[in-house]
Amino acid sequence: MASFAANRFAVRGRLVHATETPCVLEYVEDGLVVVDGGAIVAVAKDTPSVEALLRDGDPGVVVELAATDFLVPGLVDCHVHAAQYAYTGTATDKPLMEWLQHYTFPAERRCADVAYARRVYEKLVDRLLANGTTCSAMYATIHVAATKVLVDVCLEKGHRCVVGKVCMDRNGAEGYEETTAAALAGTEAVIEYVKARQPGAAPKTRVVQPCVVPRFIPTCTLPLLAGLGELAKKHDCWVQSHASETPDEMAFVESLHPGRSDSSIFDDAGLLTDKCVMAHCVYLDENELGLFAKRKCGVACCPLSNAVFSLSEGTNAFPLKRAHARGVPVGLGTDIAGGYATSMLSACRHAVVASKHAANEPDVDYRDAFWTATLGGARALGLGDTLGSFAVGKQFDACKIRCEAGVYDTFPECIPDGTPRLHIDFEQFLNLGDDRNVAAVFVQGRLVKGAV
């Protein structure tokens, strides 16, 4: 990585980012983003404004993008199981509840060995950053020490995340279950550790945000859920879990709580908040979508793992655009390792494909998917005013995209008349690109991958 440590700097070149209107992007042919102390302090979006800002605006060190490069906001992955990274790309042969017992709980149990946990977490975070994922919502394991290691790794490498200790006081596996009291005490210990590791940081601009993590309803008793709700309120912190994801999971919940849904149980515990993100939510009904919108609770749509595990079993895919229209904050997630691809580009592509198989739902195109993977994901995590676009006051989490990286071929002479080259370059990257196109990555103004 090239040395780059300027506190105040500017990036000039082509930009593509989300607007405040759901699924609408803005393309800028000549833009300038000025960064100071990790935050965006000025933006210009046309050549005269750029020249004026360069002349009068004290931009600091100016980084000029190549003519075929462009800048995008960092990608936001709303659903990652960090310990499961160890078996990513395998274990795709069983339904959810069997999968947990056969693959997941044994892999997570191994993180009692903190040296092993660190090795997995370092490789995971390196991979996420290499793919341009600057922020993720991560599940650790039930182990307090290993969860603290994940916090340390993210801070060391500069990966922004929402992270917490997984809680499960029933229906786990041999050697992988805890008491209610231990789950609550361990969760609070991790919350306090996250805050102590970032003294003086404003809550919304912490690189690592603390989180309470009830794994899902089948593994959490009502007293545990209530206690986690109290901790989330006490510490004003984030919440992650899963809701309405598979028929076997929902049948299990029905056997434990007849007549109750995941959503109502979480809501009674005070866990559906504007800092909560629930994964999958394939089976949310209209009333539940309304409840999520009312609570401003986010959804992590995970189209690849939904397909791999046939979570929807022939029913519609998650209604992404309808949920946007209802006011539900929706982001995309890889669901590592239930989803075998670690790149958010894969999540974008599968969101598009899944929409084609959803009856009576609007199609999702590449622009909709990218919006959802950036500002949509930030909103789903309750960070929409902090991340996800190039707006003054937001954190500078960004990726420099290099079109001419040898990953695919470009033919500028074939661009239709009247179509800007940037539109074609962006669509090709979304559909064909990979980590080799991600030439540089910034998180909070810090260069964490590549060179400028």
Image: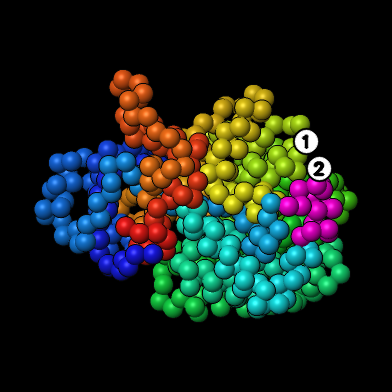
Question: What residue is disc 1 on?
Answer: 313
Is disc 2 in contact with disc 1, using a CB cutoff of under 8 Å? yes
Residue 234: x, y in percent? 58, 70
Identify the amino acid type marked 2: Pro
On the image, the x and y values in percent for residue 55 come to 11, 53
- What amino acid is found at the position of numbered circle 1 in the picture? Glu
The numbered mark at residue 25 is none
Task: For residue 234, say whether it is visible.
Answer: no
Residue located beneath label 2 in the image = 247
Q: CA gap, disc 2 to disc 1?
A: 8 Å
- What element does badge 1 sit on? loop
262 or 164: nearer the viewer: 164
**Relative vertical location of residue 198 with respect to residue 42 in this rendering, above or below:** below
Q: How many marks?
A: 2
- Residue 101 forms part of the magenta stretch: yes
Which span is picked out in magenta? 90-104
